[in-house]
Amino acid sequence: MKLIVGLGNPGEKHEKTRHNLGFLVLDRFLRDFSQVQKTIWEDNKKFKCDMAKIDWQPKKGILRKVILVKPKTYMNNSGLCVGLVSSFYKINPSDIWIIHDEIDLPLGSMKIRLGGGSAGHKGVMSIMNSLGMEKFWRFRLGIGHPRLNTKGRSLKIKLRGIDDFVLKEFAAGESGKTRELIKKASKSIQTALEENIEKAMNRFNTK
């Protein structure tokens, strides 16, 4: 069984922000997967998330049970939801894939990797704390960086600037790259399920 988690914040005002890229990718993946254009997300109050369960039958190999999750605990507490779901279904950390925005990568780029630090991403940090380890897969999706001029600024001001940046919507001139990134991320999930995650890394990781 695979647990695929898109990170973001619930609520209409957050829908199209940079920080909600994980939600947008899972929505696109589910639309790509489902032949019938309908919403199959379930509001799961027990696990504090929107959840969808699918069966993925590769052309070669056994059928895979897949749980898709969009936490409703807000980004900084994403680990609560991931911990609840993974514990209930007894999912190994190596079978958990986290889809999230990444300010340290240029807009449109993508890196899939196993483990590592949080790079300051509070959602990833929350999941690491909840699971008690960092050996889960991350699909890191580049949103660019505000490139603050920090000369003469305090760290608190710098961090506030980053928070403001990730909570804003993509600029009009970024829409093309954003759409392509969402499409590519959806395809990378499909490849990882159809073949394996190493193939997805080789095919979709930005050089």
Image (tube, rainbow, N blue to C red):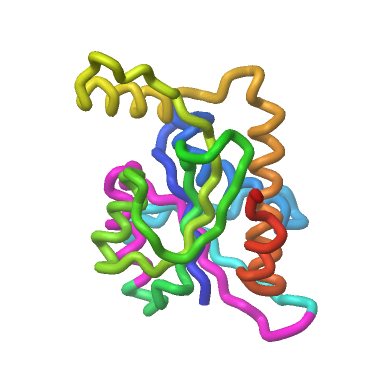
Q: Is residue 153 left or right of residue 172?
A: left
Residue 14 position (above or below residue 204): above
Q: Residue furthest top?
A: 152
Nearest the viewer among 189 and 89 is 189
Q: Quadrant of residue 74?
A: top left
Q: Residue furthest front?
A: 151
Nearest the viewer among 84 and 107 is 107
The answer to whether residue 73 is seen in the rendering is yes
The residue located at (61%, 77%) in the rendering is 64
Q: Quadrant of residue 167?
A: top left
Nearest the viewer among 177 and 4 is 177
> Where does the magenta region start and end?
60-86
Q: Is residue 123 left or right of residue 199?
A: left
The residue located at (63%, 38%) in the rendering is 108
Q: How many numbered callouts?
A: 0
The residue located at (41%, 76%) in the rendering is 91
Residue 207 position (above or below residue 94): above
Q: Is residue 64 covered in magenta?
A: yes
Q: Residue 151, image x and y in percent?
A: 29, 16
The residue located at (56%, 52%) in the rendering is 111
Q: Is residue 35 left or right of residue 113?
A: right
Q: Is residue 158 covered in magenta?
A: no
